[in-house]
Amino acid sequence: MSGSGFDSGSKSYGNGAGDTSWPETPDLLVYRLDLVLEVFNHIQTGAMVDLLDSLLECVDWREMFGSDASGFLRREQIDELKRYYAAKFAGVEPYYLAEQLSTELMTALMASGEQEFSPELKRLGMEQPELWQEIRTFFSRKEIATVRLMLAQRTNAG
């Protein structure tokens, strides 16, 4: 994309000294947590989704690639970014995409206060059975989210 003449004036990418490197993997993108929650609410109703499309719909394109200096992204620029990253990530395994979305879900739940880590857990070194249960609950919920995403993946035949 950087070779296509597309100049976004990115806030997050480029160091101002000619660095035009862009995110190379899904974990380097910035996500809107409210949209991640919407994806999970949608699949909990039994909806089938395309994981790559869902992931790209959750990206905060304006935060990543827009700026006050160059102006904010227009709809067609966001669509161009989505097409670029859809092609770039087309070969990424669905499990990786589900894992990325479930990680973002847990971030959203922690940000909302729905999932919290206790002060005891934050202070590493304290070994208590209750803390182990807390860790297990967190990762169990994340694994369930990953499985739900995998089950919600639309197939080419469906």
Image: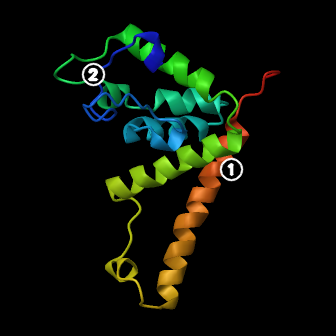
Numbered disc 2: secondary structure = loop
Between 81 and 38, the one nearer to me in the picture: 81
In the displayed structure, 6 sits above or below 150; it is above
Rendered residue at 32%/79% (across/down)? 119
Within 10 Å of disc 1 (Cα), the crowding (few <14, some 14-19, many 20+) is some
Between 50 and 71, the one nearer to me in the picture: 71
Determine the image quadrant of residue 44.
Answer: top right
Rendered residue at 48%/49% (across/down)? 105
Residue 45's x, y, as percent?
60, 37
Numbered disc 1: secondary structure = helix
Separation (CA) of disc 1 from disc 2: 38 Å
Name the residue beneath numbered marker 2. Answer: 9
Amino acid type, callout 1: Val
Position of the C terminus, as image quadrant, is top right
Rendered residue at 54%/25% (across/down)? 85
Name the residue beneath numbered marker 1. Answer: 147
